[in-house]
Amino acid sequence: MPLSGRLRFLPLSGAGAVEDYRLPAGEKAPPRWRSLIPLDETQFLAVTASGLVIKVQLRSAPVPHLASVVDIDVQRPVDVEPAASSGRFVIADTGNRVQIFDTANFEPRGTWTAPSRITGAVWIVGDRAFVEIDRKELVALPLDGEFKIAWRVPLTSSLAGPPLRRD
């Protein structure tokens, strides 16, 4: 659960308490959490509105606690939901930049800059990332290989949810 300057784990069962993950203390007010994205049973991505992405892991020793595994600052605010799937995460910032990273070690896999404002959540469906531009266009970007537009389609309004894949 995202709280001011920290993350708290709330177990579904009657399991014991888990120590919170606390962001390092700084001079600024605690950042606003943008998104929490599960990766597996013990790990998730925590994204702040200022562009900090932290991979957090539930650990059991020496006491149950949440710990930062790796983090990266994308250097710009994030105002749309990022996405993660199949070992990759995709994040869009307020500078219209879309970046893809490996979820294991946060190694960069590609960057693409949209021609104008990114207005909807980033979606991952299959081997593509989908990005909505100005509520007028949807672009598909491949997750592997060159991170450039695979195709685009005009929109008459924002997407209400993720695109569906049909094989």
Image: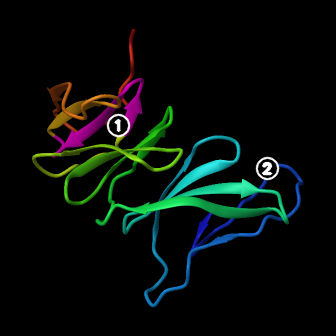
Quick one: which residue is furthest to the top in this view? 167
Horizontal side, residue 2 vs residue 49: left or right: right
Q: Name the secondary structure under disc 1.
A: loop
Could you tell me the amino acid type at mark 2? Leu
Horizontal side, residue 121 vs residue 4: left or right: left
Is residue 56 depicted above or below 29 in this figure?
above
Instruction: Tell me the residue at 27%/47% (across/down).
Output: 98
- The one of 136 and 43 positioned closer to us in this rendering: 43
Horizontal side, residue 92 vs residue 45: left or right: left
Residue 73 sits in quarter? bottom left
Q: Is 92 covered by the magenta stretch?
A: no
* Relative image position of residue 143 (x, y in whole percent): 35, 31
Q: Is disc 2 surrounded by few (<14), some (14 to 19) or many (20+) residues within 10 Å?
A: few
Horizontal side, residue 29 vs residue 90: left or right: right
* Relative image position of residue 110 (x, y in whole percent): 29, 42
Quick one: which residue is furthest to the bottom in this view? 27
The residue singled out by tag 1 in the image is: 160
**Mark sitting on residue 12:** 2
Image: magenta residue range:
123-135
- The one of 4 and 57 positioned closer to us in this rendering: 57
Q: CA distance from mark 1 to mark 2?
A: 29 Å
* Relative image position of residue 17 (x, y in whole percent): 84, 65
Q: Name the secondary structure under disc 2.
A: loop
- The one of 118 and 47 positioned closer to us in this rendering: 47
Could you tell me the amino acid type at mark 1? Ala
Residue 81 visible in image: yes
Q: Is 134 covered by the magenta stretch?
A: yes
In the picture, which quadrant includes the C terminus?
A: top left
